[in-house]
Image (cartoon, rainbow, N blue to C red):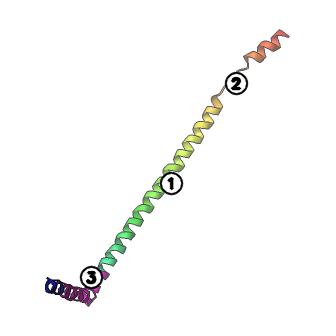
Amino acid sequence: MDMKKIGLFAAGVLFGTAGLKVLTSKDAKKAYAQTTAAALRAKDSVMTTVTAVREGADDIYAEAQAINDRRTQAEAETVVEDTSEETEESQAE
């Protein structure tokens, strides 16, 4: 039983050492660089899209504010003040 554990430990160390060599090899570094370059290109593409969407949203927001301002102004112009009581009081005098 102890020899089996020792053997498994030794195999793990050997496999780990070989894995580190593979991960730090020149080919692996090239693959990491290619993957990172692709991620950076994707980030640039996403940021371009986000900027376009944000500009569109800003335009929509500005137009919505203008619509509400025009509506408020139109409502203020159509409000008719109730002066019927004042007229009745002045006629009664």
Question: Split into 4 quadrants, where in the image is the N terminus?
Answer: bottom left
Image quadrant in which you'd find residue 91: top right
For the stretch drawn in magenta, what is the main secondary structure? helix
Q: Residues within 10 Å of mark 2 (few under 14, many from 20)?
A: few
Mark found first going from the N terminus, 2 or 3: 3
Helix, strand or loop status at disc 1? helix
Residue that appears at 23% across and 85% down: 16
Q: Residues within 10 Å of mark 3 (few under 14, many from 20)?
A: few
Vertically, is 47 above or below 93?
below
Give amino acid for label 1.
Answer: Asp
Residue 80: x and y in percent read 67, 25
Boundaries of the magenta span: 7-32
Is-magenta flag for residue 76?
Answer: no
Vertically, is 84 above or below 13?
above
Decide if residue 61 is on the left or right side of residue 34. Answer: right
Vertically, is 88 above or below 61?
above
Mark found first going from the N terminus, 1 or 2: 1
